[in-house]
Amino acid sequence: MKLFIDTADIDEIRKVASWGVLDGVTTNPSLFAKTSGMTYDEVLREICQITSGPVSAEVVAEDVEGMLREGRHFAKIADNIYVKVPMSETGLEALARFHAEGIRTNCTLIFTANQGLLAAKAGANLLSPFVGRLDDINQDGMIVIRELVSIVEIHELDSEVLAASIRNPLHVTQAALAGSHIATLPFKVFQQMIHHPLTDKGIVQFRSDWDKARKALEARSGAAAGAAGSSR
Ligand code: E4P
């Protein structure tokens, strides 16, 4: 399963890229709103210099022509831009038109397998069901991932399922076991996946045993040198 980071924060993206585990980036207007000092175009340009994987840039227009205008503009920023289009009647038309123009897309705000099926048929490259937001309203978001992965496989659709709105490490494991092609995670979830109390404790223990063994060795060789000196 490919791992994307779900952020517009350049430092977070650089950090995850430095770990060698970054396959792409998803942004959205809310994530961009958390950044400061740069335009959305500047943020996207910088992200595309960090990763050659897919970078999702979301349109905010609600009409087809507006979506097409924004998406064509994003697509010119870099070759790895995927235009993120919300699931809606106008969104489906925009997805179909982008597909015809050879512009790659990510259909966002998917909450049912049927929405994902429609997006795939309209030509979306990536299908983004929102797991966490479904869990938030007491529905099992992972069911949509499982259903959509099966639909894509059974019907050999030319789209990948991207598990989005991931809230915790368990979501990542479940998405991977469900066969999701991609999951996009907040920076915090990457960190949570790395750490385990026994791992962190083990690192401290190994370091301390190593230091103790080295000190004992130094003490033994110091004592042996002292004994050799006094016997002369
Ligand atoms: C996906 O591409 C979205 O940016 C994202 O996963 C939304 O997640 P949220 O529900 O945490 O806002």
Image (spheres, grey):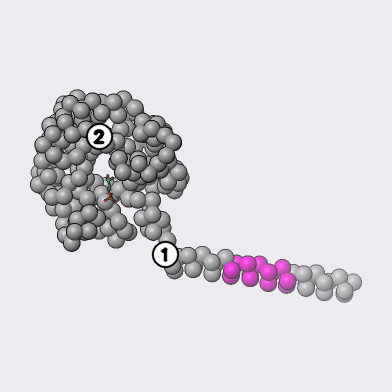
Indicate the quadrant where residue 133 lies.
bottom left
Image: 213 above or below 9: below
Q: Is residue 217 magenta?
A: yes
Indicate the quadrant where residue 8 lies.
top left
- Residue at 20% x, 28% y: name it: 66
- Could you tell me how far apart the alpha carbons at marks 1 and 2 are, in whole angstroms? 38 Å
Q: Amino acid at mark 2?
A: Val
Indicate the quadrant where residue 48 lies.
top left
Q: Is residue 147 visible to the viewer in this orientation of the structure?
A: yes
Image: 195 above or below 12: below
Q: Position of residue 89 (x, y in %)?
A: 11, 36
Label 1 close to label 2 by CB (< 8 Å) = no
- Residue at 30% x, 56% y: name it: 167
Q: Is residue 150 visible to the viewer in this orientation of the structure?
A: no
Q: Amino acid at mark 1?
A: His
- Residue at 66% x, 67% y: name it: 214
Determine which residue is flagged by label 2: 59
Asked which secondary structure carries label 1, the reply is loop
Q: Position of residue 183 (x, y in %)?
A: 28, 49
217 and 194: which is toward the camera:
194
Q: Is residue 222 left or right of residue 60?
A: right
* Pointer 1 or 2: first along the chain: 2
The magenta span reads 208-220
Determine which residue is flagged by label 1: 196
